[in-house]
Image: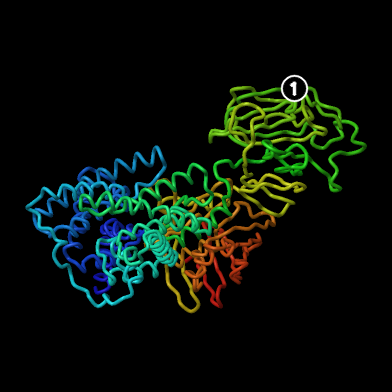
C-alpha cells in the first residue's frame, strides 16, 4: 500500500514538474541555461525582494495563461524566449513600482503586450533574417511602460524607497562590488549578494559562461574607465551588465566556444562601450535606464554578419549549455561533415578512384570537387593485354548507375569514344547525363559510351537506375566515370563539395559521409534486410533490460516514442536517446538527459552498418557526455573550447560475433572496450557491455 502511494506521489510530482517546466525555463533562459533546476533557483533568488519576485511570477503566469487561452501548443510555449521577455518586464515593473492591485493589472497588460510582440518579432526575425529575437521585446515594452509611468500618479514608485537591506557586502572593493552589482542587475536586483549567488550558479552549471561573464565585464568597464579617466564611474555603472550578456551570448551561446569566437565576443564588448554611453545620455534625459539595448544591438548585428559570411562556428543548435553545445558540435561535424549533399556510388562492384578532389590533372579551380573512377586489376592496371583497344579496358561499357533520386534534365549521347591515349578537347564532358536531385542540386556524370545512354530528358530516376555504359567520350584518355555536384543547371558550372553516403574501401573498411581518396578501391554498401528489420524500431516498441553497474543491478524498461518533428527516441525516465536509420546505417544521434542506461547504449551503438555478414571495420565519433564514469568534465570542456581536438573521442568497431569495439580518446587518455550482441529472434540488441574506469557496465535483455 505504501509503495502504491509512493508511486502515485512520484507521478504527481512528475506531472507538476512537467507543468512548471516552461515557467522555470523562462527564468533560467535569462542566463542562457534553459534548465528547470536553474530556473527554480533563480525564481527563489528573485524572492529575496518579494515585490520584484512576485511581480515577475505574475508576469510569467499571466503570459502562460494568455498563450493557452489563444490556443498555443505546449511545445511552442515551452520556448523560453516567449516567456522570459514578459518575465523581464514583470521584474522591471516590480523594481519600479510597489505591488498593488493596480500594479498587478499593469503587469498583466504589459506581459500580454510583450508576448504578442515577442511572437511577432520572432517570426519576422526568424523568417527574414534567421535571427533570434533576444530580449528586444522586453526592451521595447519596458521603455513604453517606464515612459508612460510619468503620467500614472496612482502607482507607488517603489525604487525611491528602501528595498530589502543586505549591507554586509558594502565594504567590498569597488572592482568586485561593481561586477556583482552588474550581474545582479540582470534580474533587477543590483546587489553584491544577488550577483554572487548568480555567479555561483553560472560556475556550477557552465564554467564557460562564468568565465565569459568575468572577462566581458572587466574588458568593458576597464575600456570605459580608460575613455572616461575614472574607474569609480566605470565600476559604479550597473549598465555594464550589457557587457556580461554580450560576452556570454557571443562567446558561448550563438557561437561555438572557440578562440576565434572568444575574440569576436571581446570585440563585441568593446564595440558596445560607446553604445552604452550614448544610450545613457539619451535615456537619462527621460529618467529611465537603458535596459539591454546595447546587448541586443551588438549581438544581433554580429550574428547576422557572421550568418551572411557563413562563419564556421555559428551554433546550429544550442544544447542548453556552451559545454554540451561544444561537445555535440565537435562530434556531429566529424560524424556528418556535410549533410544535404550525400550521394551514392555510380556503379556496382569494385572500382578504383583515379582522380579525387583537387586532383593533379583536371580537378582544379572551380571544378576541383569531382571524382573519377576506373576498374583496376590486382597489379593496379586498368586494362588487359596491350591496352591499345578500348575493349582492353576493364571499365569500358560497364553499367553506370544513378547515384541519386531525381529528374534527368539534360542528356548528350552522340559523341564518339576516343581511342586510348587520345582526348576530345573541344567537347570536354563528352556524353553525359545531368540529374536534378530533389534536395536542390545537380549531379553530372560524364564520358558515357556513344549511344549507350538509356534515359532521356524528363525521366524520373531512382538511386541505382541504369543510366548507360561507361565510355571514353570527351576529354578522356581512357574509359572512366566522372562525377561531380553543382548548384546550377548549366553543364560545366562550378562544382561544390559532396560526400558518398556509405561505401566499403579495400574490401574491409566501412565509410559513411566521406570522400574516397585517390587509389582507394571502393564498392557500394548494401544493407542486410533482416538486420534492418531488427533495428526498425517503431512507436510503442518496448524493451526490458537488466542493467549492471559493477555489483549493482536494476531492471529498466525502454520505450520507443516519436518527437513532434517526426524523429524517434528511446525513453528512460525523462531522458531521451534519439536514433534512426539512414543509408543502411543505424545511428544514435543525440542524448537528452542524464540516463546512464541511455549513455551506455549511445556509447555502444553510436553507428551500426546494417550488414555484418562481412568482416568490416569502421569508426565513429561520440560526444564526451555519452561516456560514463568520467571526471572533471567541466575542466575538459573549457580546455576543449581552446583546443577542439581534445574532444576527439572515437569508437572503433570490428564486426565479429559478438560485435566488438574500442572507445579511444587520444588526448584524454581514454581506452575502453565493449561488445554488442544482436538479438537472434526479436528486435534490437540482446546485450551490450562496456569496460570503463575499472568497472563493468552491461545491459542484458530479460
Considering every residue shown, the one lying at the far front of the view is 229
Left or right, residue 162 beside residue 492:
left
Residue in the image at 14% along x and 62% along y: 160
Residue in the image at 24% along x and 73% along y: 1
Left or right, residue 394 beside residue 152:
right
User: Residue 416: x percent and y percent?
Assistant: 80, 22
- In the figure, residue 198 lies in which quadrant? bottom left
Label 1's element? Answer: loop
- In the figure, residue 471 lies in which quadrant? top right
Q: Is residue 557 visible to the viewer in this orientation of the structure? A: no
Residue in the image at 39% along x and 56% along y: 246
Q: Nearer the viewer, residue 222 or 618?
A: 222
Considering every residue shown, the one lying at the far right of the view is 386
User: Residue 498: x percent and y percent?
Assistant: 62, 42
Location of residue 580 with respect to 389 vertically, above or below: below
Left or right, residue 629 beside residue 33:
right
- The residue singled out by tag 1 in the image is 451
Q: Nearer the viewer, residue 341 or 678?
A: 341
User: Residue 310: x percent and y percent?
Assistant: 52, 44
Q: Nearer the viewer, residue 238 or 187?
A: 238
Q: Is residue 345 visible to the viewer in this orientation of the structure? A: yes
Amino acid at each position: 500500500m505504501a509503495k502504491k502511494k509512493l508511486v502515485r506521489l512520484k507521478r504527481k510530482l512528475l506531472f507538476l514538474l512537467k507543468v512548471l517546466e516552461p515557467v522555470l525555463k523562462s527564468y533560467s533562459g535569462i542566463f542562457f541555461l534553459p534548465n528547470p533546476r536553474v530556473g527554480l533557483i533563480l525564481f527563489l533568488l528573485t524572492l529575496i525582494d518579494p515585490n520584484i519576485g512576485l511581480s515577475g511570477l505574475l508576469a510569467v503566469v499571466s503570459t502562460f495563461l494568455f498563450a493557452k487561452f489563444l490556443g498555443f501548443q505546449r511545445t511552442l510555449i515551452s520556448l523560453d524566449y516567449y516567456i522570459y521577455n514578459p518575465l523581464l518586464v514583470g521584474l522591471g515593473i516590480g523594481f519600479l513600482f510597489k505591488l498593488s492591485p493596480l500594479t498587478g493589472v499593469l503587469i498583466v497588460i504589459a506581459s500580454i503586450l510583450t508576448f504578442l510582440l515577442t511572437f511577432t518579432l520572432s517570426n519576422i526575425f526568424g523568417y527574414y533574417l534567421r535571427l533570434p529575437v533576444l530580449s528586444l521585446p522586453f526592451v521595447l515594452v519596458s521603455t513604453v511602460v517606464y515612459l508612460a509611468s510619468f503620467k500614472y500618479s496612482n502607482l507607488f514608485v517603489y525604487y525611491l524607497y528602501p528595498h530589502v537591506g543586505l549591507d554586509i557586502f558594502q565594504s567590498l572593493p569597488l572592482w568586485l562590488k561593481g561586477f556583482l552589482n552588474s550581474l545582479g542587475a540582470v534580474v533587477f536586483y543590483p546587489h553584491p549578494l544577488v550577483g554572487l549567488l548568480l555567479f555561483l550558479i553560472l560556475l556550477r552549471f557552465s564554467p564557460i559562461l562564468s568565465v565569459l561573464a568575468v572577462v566581458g565585464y572587466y574588458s568593458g568597464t576597464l575600456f570605459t574607465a580608460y575613455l572616461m579617466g575614472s574607474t569609480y564611474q566605470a565600476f559604479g555603472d550597473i549598465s555594464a551588465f550589457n557587457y556580461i550578456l554580450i560576452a556570454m551570448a557571443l562567446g558561448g551561446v550563438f557561437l561555438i566556444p572557440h578562440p576565434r569566437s572568444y575574440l569576436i565576443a571581446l570585440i563585441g564588448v568593446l564595440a558596445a562601450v560607446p553604445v552604452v554611453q550614448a544610450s545613457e545620455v539619451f535615456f537619462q534625459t527621460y529618467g529611465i535606464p537603458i535596459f539591454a539595448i546595447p546587448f541586443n544591438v551588438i549581438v544581433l548585428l554580429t550574428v547576422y554578419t557572421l550568418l551572411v559570411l557563413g562563419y564556421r562556428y555559428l551554433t546550429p543548435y544550442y544544447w542548453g549549455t556552451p559545454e554540451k553545445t561544444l561537445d555535440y558540435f565537435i562530434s556531429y561535424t566529424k560524424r556528418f561533415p556535410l549533410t544535404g549533399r550525400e550521394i551514392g556510388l555510380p556503379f556496382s562492384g569494385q572500382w578504383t578512384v583515379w582522380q579525387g578532389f583537387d586532383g593533379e590533372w583536371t580537378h582544379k579551380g572551380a571544378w576541383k570537387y569531382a571524382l573519377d573512377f576506373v576498374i583496376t586489376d590486382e597489379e593496379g592496371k586498368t586494362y588487359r593485354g596491350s591496352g591499345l583497344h578500348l575493349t582492353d579496358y576493364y571499365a569500358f561499357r560497364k553499367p553506370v548507375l544513378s547515384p541519386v533520386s531525381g529528374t534527368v534534365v539534360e542528356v548528350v549521347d552522340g559523341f564518339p569514344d576516343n581511342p586510348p591515349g587520345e582526348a576530345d578537347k573541344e567537347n570536354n564532358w563528352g556524353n553525359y547525363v545531368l540529374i536534378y536531385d530533389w534536395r536542390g542540386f545537380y549531379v553530372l556524370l560524364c564520358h558515357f559510351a556513344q549511344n549507350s545512354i538509356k534515359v532521356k530528358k524528363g525521366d524520373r530516376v531512382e538511386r541505382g537506375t541504369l543510366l548507360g555504359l561507361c565510355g571514353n567520350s570527351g576529354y578522356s584518355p581512357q574509359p572512366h566515370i566522372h562525377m561531380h555536384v553543382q548548384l546550377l543547371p548549366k553543364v560545366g558550372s562550378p562544382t561544390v563539395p559532396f560526400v558518398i553516403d556509405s561505401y566499403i574501401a579495400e574490401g574491409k573498411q566501412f565509410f559513411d559521409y566521406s570522400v574516397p581518396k585517390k587509389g582507394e578501391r571502393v564498392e557500394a554498401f548494401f544493407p542486410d534486410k533482416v538486420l534492418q528489420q531488427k533495428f526498425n524500431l517503431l512507436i510503442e516498441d518496448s524493451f526490458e533490460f537488466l542493467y549492471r553497474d559493477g555489483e549493482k543491478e536494476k531492471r529498466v524498461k525502454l520505450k520507443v516514442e516519436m518527437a513532434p518533428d517526426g524523429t524517434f527516441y528511446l525513453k528512460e525516465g525523462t531522458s531521451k536517446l534519439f536514433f534512426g536509420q539512414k543509408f543502411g546505417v543505424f545511428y544514435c544521434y543525440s542524448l537528452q538527459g542524464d540516463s546512464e542506461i541511455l549513455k551506455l547504449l549511445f556509447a555502444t551503438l553510436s553507428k551500426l552498418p546494417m550488414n555484418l555478414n562481412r568482416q568490416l571495420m569502421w569508426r565513429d565519433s561520440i560526444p564526451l557526455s555519452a561516456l560514463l564514469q568520467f571526471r572533471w568534465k567541466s575542466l575538459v570542456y573549457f580546455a576543449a573550447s581552446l583546443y577542439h581536438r581534445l574532444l576527439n573521442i572515437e569508437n572503433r568497431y570490428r564486426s565479429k560475433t559478438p560485435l566488438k569495439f574500442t572507445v579511444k580518446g587520444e588526448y584524454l587518455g581514454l581506452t575502453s572496450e565493449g561488445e554488442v550482441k544482436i538479438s537472434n529472434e526479436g528486435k534490437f540488441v540482446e546485450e551490450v557491455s562496456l569496460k570503463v574506469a575499472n568497472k563493468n557496465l552491461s545491459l542484458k535483455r530479460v
